[in-house]
Image (cartoon, rainbow, N blue to C red):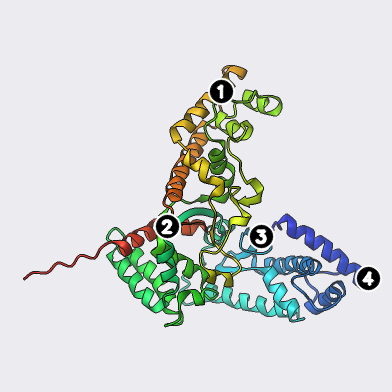
């Protein structure tokens, strides 16, 4: 099974493999030679103890991570899949069992211990785990194969949601011991009437069990390094007052936020060059609207998160989250979007797009448009998210950008039912 290597990793491998061969003065079979032999050349490149903070050392680790990945591909059909939480931008998955591995992280650990042969131990552990899945008593035949798309859905936090948090409730939650929270969450799951019984069982097995496994009596936030996702989700359960829907990060950056900063202009530039030719070819005017119409409001663009929240305004939802590296819940400042979101009006935006379409029609004549259904779906989704965002900003609460996986986004409606049960009044009927 061939395994395409992400371009940035392929470039690192080409650079490092050539440098090691030059240092050793011979051709090296990176797929088959022992790690000890490869390590001799790597040591010459490092020029001393491995330091993960040094750029040159990071490149060496990236190049060797490709070697490790290719060995795992040769032995177990491992494959790369995009993962925004991985330092190298991708992780390895395995088709016969749900095992995720960061080759870069494994190589960094091995180099830090000056023992690349440690990677053989990791490979043996993976071989054992795969064998247990394949020949386990509950196997029932060949296991279902898992592909890169499945791993992305489960592990890549490529979706984004913007939430309004009650700072008092969320802080109280994060400073409460997990054993106390577990009981409240279990009760809320049981009270969520619209939640199917099977889903209740699944959520209790995942969320409540995770809380019960943590150290009792110790604040939840003090254990964030041990279970960052549990801390995030539980804080959101108790503290969220309103939230937007979830959408891919690229959709927020390329469609939603541009619509916000574009506003509802009534004057449009004349099309020329490539844009005019694209219009004559039938590209939907909405897409041209996003591409050629100047913004009415100033945008942070590449300087900020989602091209809307400047880096200088980003922060932690609670100081305890400083203990983790891959933060998925980020507090954001609203200065850059306050004016455009306060003036956002869906009807005016749609009318502006329609007026632009008429302007395009005058310049091109009658043209058969391509992809109208897709453009309409994009526009409708963007308008829903912008109306949601307006409600979040107007809530006057702590606003955070939340990154989540596609699977987490799909489960968010169920979490909303539990959230409603947590905040709903408990009515006790008694008879005298």
Mark 1–mark 2 Cα distance, whole angstroms, equals 40 Å
Residue 395's place in the image compared with 14, above or below, is above
Q: Position of residue 111 (x, y in %)?
A: 75, 77
Q: Secondary structure at mark 3?
A: loop
Residue at 86% in and 71% down: 45
The nearer-to-camera label among 1 and 3 is 3
Mark 4–mark 1 Cα distance, whole angstroms, equals 63 Å
Position of 45 with respect to 115 (left or right) is right
The nearer-to-camera label among 4 and 3 is 3
Cβ atoms at labels 3 and 2 below 8 Å apart? no
Mark toward the start of the polypeptide (3 vs 2): 3
Position of 79 with respect to 113 (left or right) is left
Mark toward the start of the polypeptide (4 vs 3): 4
* The N terminus - image quarter: bottom right
Q: Closer to the camera, 252 or 189?
A: 252
Q: Which residue is mark 4?
A: 25
Q: Which residue is mark 2?
A: 412
Mark toward the start of the polypeptide (1 vs 3): 3
Confirm whether residue 168 shows in the render. Answer: yes
Confirm whether residue 367 shows in the render. Answer: no
Mark 4–mark 3 Cα distance, whole angstroms, equals 32 Å
Position of 175 with respect to 325 (left or right) is left
Position of 19 with respect to 32 (left or right) is right
Q: Which residue is mark 3?
A: 89
Q: Which residue is mark 1?
A: 368
* The C terminus - image quarter: bottom left
Cβ atoms at labels 1 and 3 below 8 Å apart? no
Residue at 44% in and 43% down: 387
């Amino acid at each position: 099974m061939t395994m395409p290597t992400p371009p940035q990793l392929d470039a690192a491998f080409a650079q490092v493999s050539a440098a090691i061969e030059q240092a050793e003065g011979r051709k090296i079979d990176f797929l088959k030679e022992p790690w000890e032999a490869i390590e001799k050349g790597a040591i010459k490149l490092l020029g001393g103890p491995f330091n993960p903070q040094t750029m040159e050392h990071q490149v060496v680790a990236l190049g060797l991570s490709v070697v490790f990945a290719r060995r795992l591909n040769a032995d177990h059909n491992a494959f790369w899949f995009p993962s925004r939480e991985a330092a190298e931008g991708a992780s390895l998955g395995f088709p016969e069992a749900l095992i995720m591995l960061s080759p870069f992280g494994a190589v960094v650990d091995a180099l830090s211990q000056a023992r690349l042969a440690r990677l053989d131990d990791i490979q043996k552990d993976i071989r054992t785990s795969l064998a247990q899945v394949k020949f386990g008593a509950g196997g029932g035949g060949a296991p279902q194969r898992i592909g890169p798309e499945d791993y992305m859905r489960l592990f890549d936090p490529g979706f984004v949601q913007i939430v309004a948090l009650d700072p008092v409730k969320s802080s109280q939650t994060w400073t409460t011991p997990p054993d106390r929270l577990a009981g409240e969450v279990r009760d809320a799951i049981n009270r969520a009437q619209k939640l199917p019984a099977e889903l209740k069982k699944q959520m209790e097995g995942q969320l409540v069990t995770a809380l019960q496994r943590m150290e009792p009596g110790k604040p939840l936030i003090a254990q964030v390094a041990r279970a960052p996702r549990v801390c995030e989700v539980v804080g959101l359960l108790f503290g969220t007052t309103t939230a937007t829907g979830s959408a891919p990060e690229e959709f927020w950056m390329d469609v939603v936020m541009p619509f916000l900063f574009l506003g509802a202009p009534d004057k449009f530039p004349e099309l020329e060059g490539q844009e005019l030719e694209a219009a004559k070819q039938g590209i939907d005017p909405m897409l041209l609207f996003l591409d050629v119409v100047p913004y009415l409001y100033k945008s942070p663009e590449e300087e900020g998160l989602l091209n809307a929240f400047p880096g200088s305004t980003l922060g932690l939802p609670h100081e305890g989250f400083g203990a983790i590296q891959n933060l998925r819940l980020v507090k954001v400042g609203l200065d850059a979007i306050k004016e455009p979101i306060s003036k956002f009006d869906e009807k005016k935006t749609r009318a502006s797009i329609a007026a632009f379409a008429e302007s395009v029609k005058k310049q091109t004549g009658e043209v058969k448009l391509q992809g109208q259904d897709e453009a309409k779906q994009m526009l409708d989704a963007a308008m829903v998210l912008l109306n949601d965002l307006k409600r979040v900003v107007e809530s006057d609460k702590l606003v955070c950008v939340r990154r989540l996986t596609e699977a987490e986004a799909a489960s968010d409606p169920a979490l909303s039912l539990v959230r409603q049960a947590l905040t709903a009044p408990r009515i006790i009927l008694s008879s005298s």
